[in-house]
Image (cartoon, rainbow, N blue to C red):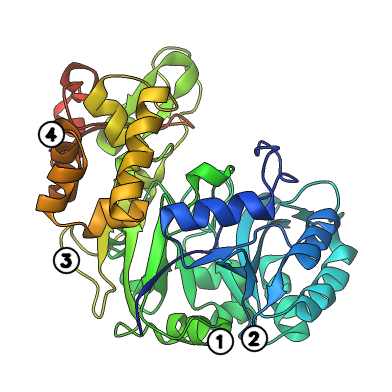
Amino acid sequence: MPEFVADFHIHSRYSRACSKDLSVPELAKWAKIKGIGVLGTGDFTHPLWLQELKDTLRDTGRGLFEHDGAQFMLTAEVNTLFYRRAKAHNVHHVLLAPSFEAVERINDGLSAFGSLSLDGRPILHMDAWRLAEVVLGLEPRCLIVPAHAWTPHFAIFGSNSGFDSVEECFEHQAKNIHVLETGLSSDPAMNWRLSALDRYALISNSDSHSARRIGREANVFDCEPSYDAIVNTLKAKDRAKFLYTVEFFPEEGKYHFDGHRKCGIRYAPAQTRQQGGRCPVCGRALTVGVMSRVEKLADRPEGVPSPHAVPFKHSVPLEEIIADALGVGVGTQAVDREYFNLIDRCGTEFAVLLKAPEEQLRKAAPAKIAEGILRMRRGDVTVAPGYDGEYGKVHIFGGEAEAQPTTPAEQQMTLF
């Protein structure tokens, strides 16, 4: 059975700050271009998007749905807003469901806790444990995944509204949490530093707000392409069937380091501690990023893998590599031309990034673009870490002056 790529966490045009061009046909088109075998639908809680899904998707009989050769899984992201000891917590979760019937039951149950029609990512006034209790009570085959687990404002471990453990967040329902989403600003190696997370499967998804950005992080499986096979593989953390994840270089994520974007302050964790957590320009509290939270909770040193860990591979979106090689911006005609030329010659974006032999790449692309892909595979990149909502910047060719860290503390976190 051939391996396949899956991206479970995306959004529709009914979520805030998402492309208005998002539709099922557009997602299907880009799933095939990228090489994604199973794509989450996103936003099944929104009534208009749900109706569009019903109108355009064909049931495969395997808990997955098909449109124009692309396979979909019913997924959604919800925000639970609740209070503990007078502190507000916003925690996002990705929900996976096996059927439209299950989705209807779930939506009926969740509608008691907030409006499902205002946003594709609804705010639900309920505790995290209550979400698990309601969803799994309505459909035991569902999977509940804490989303982008480390981001400061809306995550289970986030510095602003999160917790220090799964048990603290989900209380008596913690036993029903089997999977965590690492998010763009962390990778599995960072999560391995917490022994308490050893039992969880770590997945990576794009959290994409446009069709063109699906698959920027993803998961690779070698199991039957069905809902139950995928969910059971994740619950069992079966390394024979869950092969690896595809990850951003975590420094590229927009909350990797601490900082204050308005004042242009980007700090490594040690610098934040030296400054007492305050911006040296305006005196306000810095946004504490993912690296600082990992260091605070870690009980393992860097470089020690978790027992039975699922491997991962770092990657950079193909458009970014081409743009860097050509010295132009992403989205330009020159980048588009080379992008689709490579897709035409190698099959899919994932084939280009991860699978195509060096000889094939050098025949299919101009020399500098092929070299950029090979450098990315070796991790031979320079990254200016993201902070306080600002994406980090990856450079493969040049850009060292911009991306070079300015302090020894930052230099320790840079990949070359």
Which residue lies under the disc numbered 4?
Answer: 367
Which residue lies under the disc numbered 2?
Answer: 141
Task: Using the numbered discs, state the Cα–Cα distance from disc 3 to disc 4 in whole angstroms.
Answer: 37 Å
Task: Using the numbered discs, state the Cα–Cα distance from disc 4 to disc 1 in whole angstroms.
Answer: 44 Å
The amino acid pointed to by label 2 is: Arg
Residue 42: where, in percent of width, then height? 65, 58
* Of the pair 377 and 310, the residue shown nearer to us: 377
Query: Disc 3, disc 4: CB below 8 Å?
Result: no
Mark 2 or 1, nearer chain start: 2
Residue shown at 76% from the left, 53% from the top:
122
* Of the pair 340 and 245, the residue shown nearer to us: 340
Task: Using the numbered discs, state the Cα–Cα distance from disc 2 to disc 1 in whole angstroms.
Answer: 8 Å
**Residue 228 badge:** 1
Which residue lies under the disc numbered 3?
Answer: 304
Which circle, 3 or 2, is nearer the viewer? 2
Residue shown at 25% from the left, 36% from the top:
270
Mark 1 or 3, nearer chain start: 1
Query: Disc 2, disc 1: CB below 8 Å?
Result: yes
Identify the secondary structure beneath mark 1: helix
